[in-house]
Image (tube, rainbow, N blue to C red):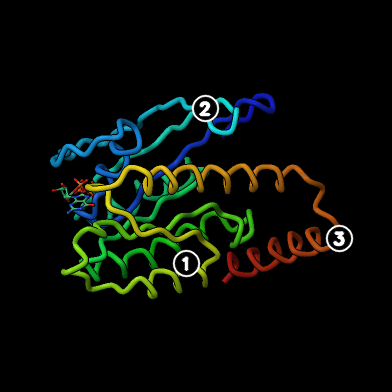
């Protein structure tokens, strides 16, 4: 991500989740305000410019269909994580496996982006398909607790029925990206220096095992 001036900002957002949870539906809802029902399996990066709080924001949003090929999924996942400034981790409230996958994604992201400090990685956990509450298998509380424990934002939305909820996800995440960027620019202070030095040494120790 690059920031060019106080009133301009761009953010790379990657949307992750198992198949059929509504990743494309969420993105298309955000970009067009519409729900079109069927989305296909094409991997794309969408660019979208909007004004948020007087700022000219350029979103780049990576929509990647979930691959059943574990080794392929794993290597592309790392590329996406490196590329992204912020993450939307989507599960379906009717699909427990998709929820369990969010916990795995969290670990992976935090492991890859550990130089930022675990709690500073901008991540939104999103339980989608809220309109299907009669088929719910993941209680809201579980999603909320997972997000709280991981220092993430939490939302339950319906890409099918509601634009506003989806908008809140992307705007909330943008705010976190902005905060992470401004705290990264601040001088580390003695606590930050101690943390960074110990992170380097613990990584070396792990590398050498
Ligand atoms: N009822 C309901 N259906 C939804 C919602 N969001 C998405 N869907 C449906 O769920 C199915 C999967 O949506 P997609 O957006 O293609 O899901 P995806 O996560 O991108 O799927 P992959 O491309 O396979 O990884 C489609 O039939 C959508 O119409 C929702 O909020 N409510």
Nearest to the observer: residue 150 or residue 160: 160
Work out whether mark 2 precedes mark 3 in sequence or the reverse, and give the earlier one.
2
Q: Find residue 51 and name its label.
A: 2
- Position in image of residue 132 (x %, y %): 19, 62
Q: CA distance from mark 2 to mark 3?
A: 37 Å
**How crowded is the residue under tag 2: few (<14 C-alpha within 10 Å), some, or many (20+)?**
few
Marks 3 and 1: which is nearer the front? 1
Residue corresponding to mark 1:
147
Q: Is residue 83 left or right of residue 189?
A: left
- Position in image of residue 140 (x %, y %): 35, 70
Q: Is residue 71 left or right of residue 142?
A: left
Secondary structure beneath label 2: strand
Residue corresponding to mark 3:
190
Work out whether mark 1 precedes mark 2 in sequence or the reverse, and give the earlier one.
2
Query: Which residue corresponds to the image point at 60% horizontal and 28% vertical from the top-left?
Result: 54
Query: Which residue corresponds to the image point at 34% horizontal and 51% vertical from the top-left?
Result: 16
Work out whether mark 3 precedes mark 1 in sequence or the reverse, and give the earlier one.
1
- Position in image of residue 22 (x %, y %): 24, 50
Instruction: Report the quarter where the N terminus lies.
Output: top right
């Amino acid at each position: 991500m690059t920031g060019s001036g106080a009133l301009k900002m761009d953010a790379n957002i990657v949307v992750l989740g198992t198949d059929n949870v509504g990743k494309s539906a969420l993105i298309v809802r955000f970009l067009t305000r519409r729900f079109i029902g069927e989305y296909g399996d094409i991997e794309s990066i969408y660019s979208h410019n909007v004004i948020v709080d007087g700022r000219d924001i350029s979103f780049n949003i990576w929509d990647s269909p979930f691959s059943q090929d574990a080794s392929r999924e794993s290597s592309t996942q790392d590329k996406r994580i490196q590329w992204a400034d912020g993450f939307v981790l989507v599960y379906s409230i009717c699909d427990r496996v998709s929820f369990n996958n969010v916990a795995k994604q969290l670990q992976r992201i935090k492991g890859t982006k550990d130089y930022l400090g675990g709690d500073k990685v901008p991540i939104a956990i999103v339980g989608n398909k809220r309109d299907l509450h009669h088929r719910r298998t993941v209680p809201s509380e579980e999603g909320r607790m997972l997000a709280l424990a991981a220092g993430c934002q939490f939302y339950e939305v319906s890409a099918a029925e509601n634009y506003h909820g989806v908008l809140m996800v992307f705007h909330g995440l943008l705010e976190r990206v902005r905060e992470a960027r401004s705290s990264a620019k601040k001088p580390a202070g003695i606590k930050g220096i101690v943390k960074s030095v110990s992170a380097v040494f613990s990584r070396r120790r792990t590398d050498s095992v």
